[in-house]
Amino acid sequence: MTKTLIKQILAASLATSLTLTPFASNACTSFLLKGSDGGFVYGRTMEFGLALKSQLTVIPRNLPVPGVGVDNKPGSGLNWTTKYAVAGMNGLGMPVLVDGMNEKGLLGGLLNAPNTAVYQVVSPADSAKSIASIQMLMYALTNFATVDEVKEGFKKIYVNRSIIPAYHNSSAPVRMTLHDAKGKSIVIEYLKGELVITDNPTGVMTNDPAFRDQLNNIGNYANLTNVEKAPMVINGASFVPPSSGSGLHGLPGDYLSPSRFIRALFLTKSAPTSYSTAQQTNTAWHILGSFDIPPGAISLPASNAYGGGAGGVEITEWTVVADNKNMMYYVKMFETTNVQAFDLKKIDMNAKDIKYYSLDKPQSYISVN
């Protein structure tokens, strides 16, 4: 397949995507764990009210990508050629990543921020220096190896306000979390039309409010600890906690974004530091279970864009764990409890086109008798 044909296919797919629903969701949660052997493990959930039909998507090096400009058209924005190969998750069959990891161990995802995301005002003259918000992650992972490179790179481009008609003629309202092979983490937001890049000492990311507000909220839970509390003694009488878990009494358990942020922060902060990167992948799955949304727990009214205009439920469509030391990318889809593993070390980095892998596999069990 020629690069010209690839570019035409990408442009057509992107044009189609702009008439569909936004790719990010209402209740995503992500975090980072450190392994004792120098690697890092990233975990995230993807929630949505419509079937995203995501596929595992592999983008090779040296692939031309058409940037979406201010006129909403692929090719009128900042066109680029991929420098690094990437594997990750797309949405609705489109060549736009909402989560992924590149060959250098840079990884992360897009998370919904409908109450705060406001992109830059880009003039037609500067359209060729801009991309659409749904292209942010793909641009970062295919161009950069570290978060420091991302910081400098995003200062040189614009993210425009190109629209998605099905989302009230608005831009896809997302923010981006990124982590590199050295464990550095950043959050990229566009607030009130300005680029805001924040170092993330927690490694945790959820949705609105603005990330700085999420960080400021941590102090409200300074009393929480993973260490069990001693009995309270009053006038010689001892009052023992009713069970284990007293140190984290008051840890929020609901699905609101600030609550999920605090919950993810303390669960990751409590993870054993002696675990290797491979062992932390199992830790990540256990933590992610705290954010899995059972069907029906969040019901969406017909007026909600994520309900497709006909109501519905928001579910955890898929869950990802990525190990950037061993270059493994794991996915669990909503329909089953299977964990599917993808080895980035085995991909053809210099393939001629994008490759898609279906994750629509039947439920399987390990028989013990």
Image: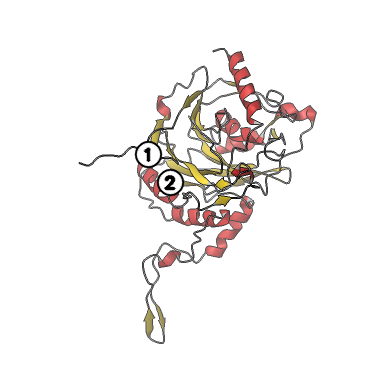
The quarter of the displayed image where residue 66 is located:
top right
Q: Nearer the viewer, residue 160 or 172?
A: 172
**The disc labelled 2 sits on which kind of residue?**
Lys
Q: Split into 4 quadrants, where in the image is the C terminus?
A: top left
Q: Residue 75 — which label? A: none
Q: Which mark is residue 338?
A: 1
Amino acid on which the number 1 mark rests in the picture: Asn
User: Which image quarter: residue 146?
Assistant: top right
Image check: 259 left or right of 78? left
Can residue 188 be seen from the camera position used here?
no
Quadrant including the N terminus: top right
- Tally of numbered discs: 2
Residue located farthest toward the bottom when viewing the structure as drawn: 235
The disc at residue 34 is 2
Residue placed most toward the observer, 358 or 119: 358
In this view, which residue lies farthest toward the left?
369
Q: Find residue 127 and report its horizontal and vertical position in percent.
A: 74, 28
Pointer 1: residues within 10 angstroms few (<14), some, or many (20+)?
some
Q: CA distance from mark 2 to mark 1?
A: 24 Å
